């Protein structure tokens, strides 16, 4: 090991110069490094080894970060903090980051319906907390053991981690990565003026000028797309896209049914359209959301408040195809209990707050869950990803056991973040997915309460908080 490399290794980091600086040094030393073994030459060889390593890093190979963290402790920043029974914008002081943490300067953060209680809730919180669970930003410092991202990278701090090494990741289920058990990693990242420690919800937060994230939650994105659009890939937009592409990839010409036309459901509409679905049938009680669904590619929109009792039969009938001659590829008629859609996404959820727009037939969200299962054909796929449902649900035993419907869980629709986020970026760049069509409002940090109130009331679709 060269002297310089050893020095780096002992420090566990490389500081100061950049990979490209060292790459230039490689070119200067390569021509005269092959001489004798004098101390001077050995130092040159050592420099060559370090430079070669650096040049390798420059080509994207594994290696140490380009720039490691100096001390970041004491850095001031502003954040929305829930504390006690209230909330406020607080001036905070950053604590030191840990070796596997990444310091991200937040540029945008996606408003999520499940976070409305964290922002607007009335109850007391045990510890001061920065709400939300995703964000977009720029890496400003990395701990000495971080490899995935480098200082200066644009980075998505995703609501789902992907470590690539735990049992779940190695068995093909990174949406359930062990690092998702974020309670393990929640500790104060900053202090309020009185010295009280502040934690981040789900070990991410997001409604803050700074995010301190474990490396496993950080997805570097190499694109020029706007921050507010990319922020949607940490939460709602990605969840909807994943629901049509990961565990139940929509097939061309197939029938797709989507419950809910909020940001997630509308992303699912775009995902189904991008995969050339046949019918895209959307069930949504809110009129302006039904109109948006049509705009984005739905072929039929239905109000679940109209003839609620016959909704399942009507959807099954729409999916019945051009013939009931089942010796010619057809199916039984609409009354067939295993009839229905090939792919179904449940993205409506329950009401955490009273909506200020049209309400659905069941605020608990359980009716939509059951209807979603009922309209999935035998052998079809149902992806569940909504939140806010309350209570328990039951199914008829024989159908539940024998209908061969496949049910997929929905931590972000089954998104595999490191693999999928770059794919979604490409789809946006190609124009097959349009986040801007879903983003209807942006707010600064001072507008967090107002923005989340709109989310809770369902009067806006995609709400993004931006940071200058
Ligand atoms: Zn969320
Ligand atoms: Zn993992």
Image (spheres, grey):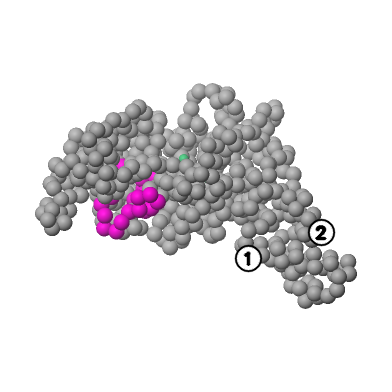
Query: Toward the viewer: 126 or 210?
Result: 126
- Magenta range is 245-271
When asked about the image quadrant of residue 370, the answer is top left
Q: Residues within 10 Å of mark 2 (few under 14, many from 20)?
A: some
Which residue is located at x 26 percent, y 47 percent?
A: 379
When asked about the image quadrant of residue 309, the answer is top left
| Label 1 residue near ligand 2, CB within 8 Å | no
Q: Secondary structure at mark 1?
A: loop
Q: Is residue 273 above or below residue 134?
A: below
Q: Is 456 left, or right, of 129 in this rendering?
A: left
Image spot of residue 371 (x, y percent): 26, 37
Q: Is residue 70 inside the magenta stretch?
A: no
Image spot of residue 264 (x, y percent): 39, 45
Distance from Cα at disc 2 to Cα at disc 1:
23 Å
Which residue is located at x 12 percent, y 46 percent?
A: 333
Image spot of residue 89 (x, y percent): 60, 34
Q: Is 256 left, or right, of 442 in this rendering?
A: left
Which residue is located at x 52 percent, y 47 percent?
A: 162
Residue identified by numbered label 2: 3
Q: Please indicate, yes or no, whether residue 7 appears anywhere in the rendered image.
A: yes
Query: Toward the viewer: 135 or 162?
Result: 162
The N terminus is located in which quarter? bottom right
Q: Which mark is residue 317?
A: none
Residue identified by numbered label 1: 59
| Label 2 residue near ligand 2, CB within 8 Å | no
Counting every numbered tag in the picture gives: 2
Query: Toward the viewer: 179 or 38?
Result: 38
Image spot of residue 103 (x, y percent): 64, 46
Q: Secondary structure at mark 2?
A: helix
């Amino acid at each position: 090991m060269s002297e310089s490399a050893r020095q780096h290794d002992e420090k566990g980091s490389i500081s100061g110069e950049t990979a490209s600086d060292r790459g230039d040094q490689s070119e200067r030393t390569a021509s005269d490094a092959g001489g004798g073994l004098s101390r001077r030459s050995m130092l040159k060889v050592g420099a060559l080894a370090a430079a070669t390593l650096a040049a390798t890093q420059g080509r994207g190979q594994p290696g140490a970060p380009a720039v490691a963290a100096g001390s970041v402790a004491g850095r001031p920043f502003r954040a929305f903090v829930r504390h006690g029974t209230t909330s406020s914008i607080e001036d905070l002081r950053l604590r030191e980051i840990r070796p596997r943490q990444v310091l991200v300067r937040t540029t945008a953060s996606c408003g999520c319906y499940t976070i409305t209680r964290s922002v607007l809730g009335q109850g007391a919180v045990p510890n001061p907390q920065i709400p939300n669970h995703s964000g977009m930003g720029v890496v400003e410092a990395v701990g000495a053991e971080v490899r995935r991202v480098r200082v200066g990278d644009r980075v998505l701090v995703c609501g789902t981690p992907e470590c690539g090494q735990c049992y779940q990741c190695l068995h093909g289920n990174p949406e359930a990565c062990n690092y998702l058990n974020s309670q393990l990693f929640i500790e104060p990242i900053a202090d309020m003026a009185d010295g009280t420690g502040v934690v981040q919800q789900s070990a991410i937060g997001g409604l803050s000028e700074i995010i301190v994230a474990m490396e496993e939650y950080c997805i570097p994105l190499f694109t020029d797309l706007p921050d507010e659009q990319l922020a949607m890939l940490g939460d709602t937009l990605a969840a909807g896209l994943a629901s049509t592409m990961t565990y139940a990839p929509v097939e061309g010409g197939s029938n797709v049914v989507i419950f809910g036309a909020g940001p997630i459901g509308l992303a699912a509409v775009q995902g189904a359209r991008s995969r050339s679905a046949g019918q895209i049938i959307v069930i949504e009680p809110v009129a302006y959301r039904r109109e948006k669904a049509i705009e984005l590619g739905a072929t039929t929109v239905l109000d679940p408040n109209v003839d609620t009792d016959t909704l399942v039969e009507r959807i099954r009938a729409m999916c019945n195809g051009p013939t009931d001659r089942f010796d010619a590829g057809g199916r039984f008629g609409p009354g067939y209990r295993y009839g229905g859609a090939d792919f179904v996404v449940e993205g409506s959820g329950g009401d955490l707050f009273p909506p200020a727009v049209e309400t659905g037939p069941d605020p608990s969200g359980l009716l939509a869950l059951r209807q979603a299962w009922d309209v999935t054909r035998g052998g079809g796929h149902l992806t569940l990803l909504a939140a806010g449902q309350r209570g328990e649900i039951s199914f008829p035993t024989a159908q539940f056991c024998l209908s061969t419907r496949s049910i997929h869980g929905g931590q972000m629709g089954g998104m595999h973040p490191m693999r999928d986020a770059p794919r979604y970026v490409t789809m946006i760049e190609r124009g097959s997915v349009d986040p801007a069509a879903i983003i209807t409002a942006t707010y600064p940090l001072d507008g967090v309460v107002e923005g989340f109130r709109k989310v809770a009331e369902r009067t806006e679709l995609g709400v993004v908080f931006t940071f200058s």
